[in-house]
Amino acid sequence: MDPPERERLPFFKDPKIKFSVWTIIKDCIGQDLTRISLPVYLSMPMSALQMQLASCEYLSLLDQAIEQTDPLLRLAYVATYAMAQFNHVERCYQKAFNPLLGETFEIVTDKYEALGELAVHHPPVLAYYVKGKSGFIRQSTMRFKPKFVRGSVQAQNINMDYIDLLPHGEKYQVRSPGISINNIIIGTPYLDIVGKQIIKNLSNPDRYFSLVEFEKRGWSQNSYHKFAGEIYDGAKNPVYRLEGKWSERAVLTDLKTGQQRVMWEKAPYPENWQYMYGLTRYCINLNYLPKQLRPFLPPTDSRLRPDQRALENGDFKLAAELKNMLEEKQRAVRRYNEKHSITPRPSYFEEWVNPSDPENLYYKYTGKYFEKDRIEKNWGHLPDIYSEKLPQEVEEFEKKIKKGK
């Protein structure tokens, strides 16, 4: 049996190796950034599907929220969790792999279970479901809209997240800030969190809400990663102030008494993090595949993706070849679907109309993964997305196209 967790990646990538991002992106300005396929050496060995579930690292904050009897303190813990979910991007500058259509990713622990799936290929829509044994549920539909702005790339989820605290009958709506990738042309690239985070308790939407603003990074290091905001009561008066650095810790101050409490502190980075893509200790375990886990995984899980695994092992040439093979296979399947007017549907999420945001596309969990298929190991209906072989009907279709040429 393998250790349940690992302390390092199997291959150390020299952080001193330089490359010109400008030579890659200069021809991409004005294009749809979600369609750009970058060379594998610009990537980290992780799928974007996995990286979004890095937010699970501090789910204990939602456990703590449930323990509170004061609804404003519950909201403060939810706001702290929504802030802390960005901490892993602090030193993580390289791009994650674009998920393949049908790709899934699970995390199962003794405290929570989480599932992600690429629901729509283009524009990419990622659907997530997280359930804690203490009684919280998080449902997320991620659709980022990236854009170039004066030497930076900015992206924000245009959808809202929802967090339920079932023991209290509360549902929270979260509008997240954006992520800005700066100095992509000149200077040292860095990531920043920018904009506002707005959270409403939908059980009492006019009574309890929080507003947290993420400050733009300045010239001095002291200005990096700062955020500050308030938790408001029913009279729209600030009751608590939440502030700190999203890369370090969060402190809550009772504005009436002045009493403070540390709500969250970031865990230390692993040793040699510079050689492991700047990943946190939690993140280096997202792609870990111990022998005892493999029998439980569907064939679509991100951990089984061969190009990503090759990159993690330091075989850049093989990773590039496999990445090209998988992308060509996906393009062939897409051509077949478009020709036959087939609209692929996710296996474990379904569309739903969000009354608070009816103009955007949302997905919710169907209840068939953890409750049925994982128990029965019923994976026969899932697509084969990682092998070289094309589905028979797609292969025949591709042959007809070549003969037509």
Image (spheres, grey):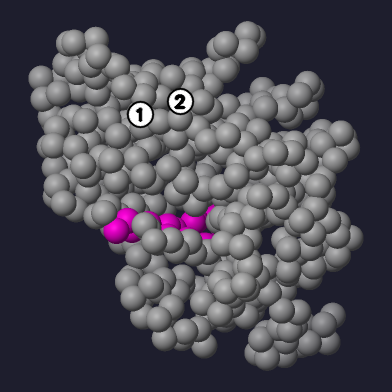
- Residue 320: tell me if it is visible: no
387 magenta-colored: no
Point 30% across, 37% down: residue: 78
Residue 26 image position (x, y, % from top left): 80, 35
Quarter that holds the C terminus: bottom right
Position of 217 relative to 305 (above/below): above
Residue 263 tag number: 1
- Judging depth in this view, the residue of 20 and 289 nearest the camera is 289
Residue marked by disc 2: 249
* In the displayed structure image, the side of residue 52 where residue 128 appears, left or right: left
Residues shaded magenta: 114-133
- Identify which amino acid the numbered label 2 is placed on: Arg
Upstream in the sequence, badge 2 or badge 1? 2
Residue 265 in sight in this render = yes
Say if mark 2 contacts mark 1, CB within 8 Å: yes
Residue at 52% x, 48% y is 54
User: Could you classify mark 2 by the number of other residues whose Cα lies within 10 Å: few (under 14), some (14-19), or many (20 or more)?
Assistant: some
Instruction: Examine the image and state in which quarter residue 139 appears.
Output: bottom left
